[in-house]
Amino acid sequence: MFSGIRFHHGLSFLILSIVSEWSVCTKYAPVVVTKYGKVRGLMVDSDRGNEGASLYLGIPFSQPPVGELRYERPKQPEKWEGIKDVQEFPPSCPPHHRSDIIPPMSEDCLYLSVLTPMQADDYVEKYPVMVWIHGGGFGIGSASMLGYESFVHSFVSKSIVVVLIQYRLGPFGFFTDGSTDIASNLGYWDMTLALQFVHENIAAFGGDPNQITVAGHSAGGAAVGGLCISPHSRDLFQQAIQMSGSPMSLWATSDSSVKGSLEIAEYLNCSTQDSKKLKICMKTKSIYDIMDAVSATGSAPYSADVIKFSPRVDGDFFPRKLDDLIKESPKKPTLMGLAQKESAFFVIQGNCETLVAHIISPAKFDHFAESDIIKVIDEVFAPEEFFGDETKNAREDLYKHFVWRKHPDSNDTRFYLEMYTEIFSDVVFNVPIIREGMLKMENNWPVWFYLIDHFNLATFRPDDPVKGSTHTSEFFYLFNNFTDESAMVDDEARMQKTMVNSLINFIKTGNPSTNSFKWFPISREHPMRNFRFRPDSLMAESFFDENVAFWKSMEKYHYDIIDGKRKETRPKLDEL
């Protein structure tokens, strides 16, 4: 949901810091002719050897969404004359909140970057392509956050072309009043136009337009799932990697953006009675006016629907229910996975405070008690508006499962913090991803599950009460994000090799198995089968089974906490 913006050790903990191993050549990369004009990038080399790459950073795939084009669908870029130098990452898109600005920032931010292996003959050979979509709760983040070095080391050096894209965020990318006069899901339309650019132009950069994998983490992973099934985007690529993100999560597809949009419009004195006039008024506001309006009206909802500006089923980009779109869409090979304790990254470690209202202060760690988790269950997961006359019974079932089921003999605050993390992980990440994967499998999509089943103590503070692999744990291995060199011990190196090789093989072949291990997809006979990433990686048959069964049992109360819908609106799945 929110990967890629602020770790508890600070931003430098996320952004790769191995620039000293890289040198930018004075030599330009070959000029590439795109549909819109010529571009010229730079070449880079690594001291590691054999990791040179050509970088084309900041290629426009849209006209700037500014002025009259704010709150409009993106338009194809105008053609340019001469050669455009594309040698710096583009500015980040405006986030939903001032404190999340990543400089440089500009509303003119719809650019993509291409990282491609060096070739002697101007990209005659065609390589498989990975398009990376950054996370950030659809409200923060940028394509440049991980730099280029990590992608070159892990993927480009293995003969894969990498494309990094940006999209409008928060109140700029997901503003809507629910009408057709103000288009919903502009961020998704941005991604789709970027994929169209890739599909039409990537061959000129040495990429194979018929072998494109779209990958993302958190909100980026959820976006990948959405792009797989929208009629507007699903035919532009062949494979998908969804890390810790599903469009079937309530935060990733709901009407919360309508409420949030109307709140900031009213704060900015834009009438909400006429949609056309509302859009005209919002176009006159500065980006800082809009960010300040989000801050003033509350950037982080205190609810199970944790995102203020999310995508929605709008009748256009998503013309029907997601379940129906999954059934009718091309059956793309899909790699999906989770960490052990996803939500600890937020609720315990305190990341993304402008997006998440459920963070527990470290000052509260030693005093967090049964009454605290019961209060959260009552207010967030089982308010009376969800269950009506059945509220008391629904709450008791939640208490039994998340409070009393493993009740400690003493008032163990660590236990209650673990359960607090577990319920948020289930609702926000685990159950939606498993549901999506199983629904796809039921409809003949090839699906592989994974679990990050290992963590490194060096990545935690000594006083962190909940430890385990968390949201963004993949980044340590895929992007070499170990700030402490001593943390990269033999176990970590083995796990890194396994993870990187499996993703590379999936991108190249559509199957994550390698010469070292056989990774089986899920099936009707093995619906929970998953690959465990750890130093001694293995296949397993359990995947949060007990909790998935519990949430299935809650359907008897006719409200689905996971997707925020009445039970009658969901199809019945034998496996869930």
Image (tube, rainbow, N blue to C red):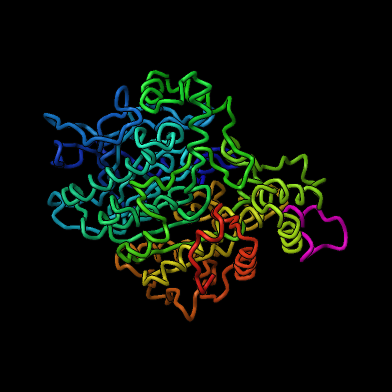
Q: Quadrant of residue 274?
A: top left
Residue 295 lies in the magenta stretch: no
Query: Observer-nearest residue: 488 or 462?
Result: 462
Q: Position of residue 209 (x, y in %)?
A: 21, 55
Q: Residue furthest front?
A: 389
- Direction bottom: furthest residue: 525
Q: Position of residue 117 (x, y in %)?
A: 25, 52
Quadrant of the image occupied by residue 13: top right
Residue shown at the point (21%, 59%) measured from the top left: 210
Q: Nearer the viewer, residue 315 or 360?
A: 315
Residue drawn 48% across and 29% down? 101
- Which segment did they paint magenta? 402-420
User: In this rendering, would 64 be left or right of 386?
Assistant: left
Q: Residue furthest right?
A: 410
The stretch drawn in magenta includes residue 407: yes
Residue 251 place in picture, x, y as percent: 52, 47
Residue in the image at 50% along x and 68% along y: 572
The residue lying at 54 percent from left, 54 percent from top is 563
Q: Is residue 39 left or right of residue 300?
A: left
Q: Is residue 50 visible?
A: no
Q: Nearer the viewer, residue 428 or 185?
A: 185
Q: Say how many tags the image has.
A: 0
Q: Is residue 8 visible?
A: yes
In this view, 420 is above or below 503: above
- Vertical side of 106 occupied by 166: above or below: below
Q: Is residue 258 above or below residue 384?
A: above
Work out which quarter of the rendered image holds the C terminus and state it.
bottom right
> Is 279 left or right of 95, judged from the image as shown?
left
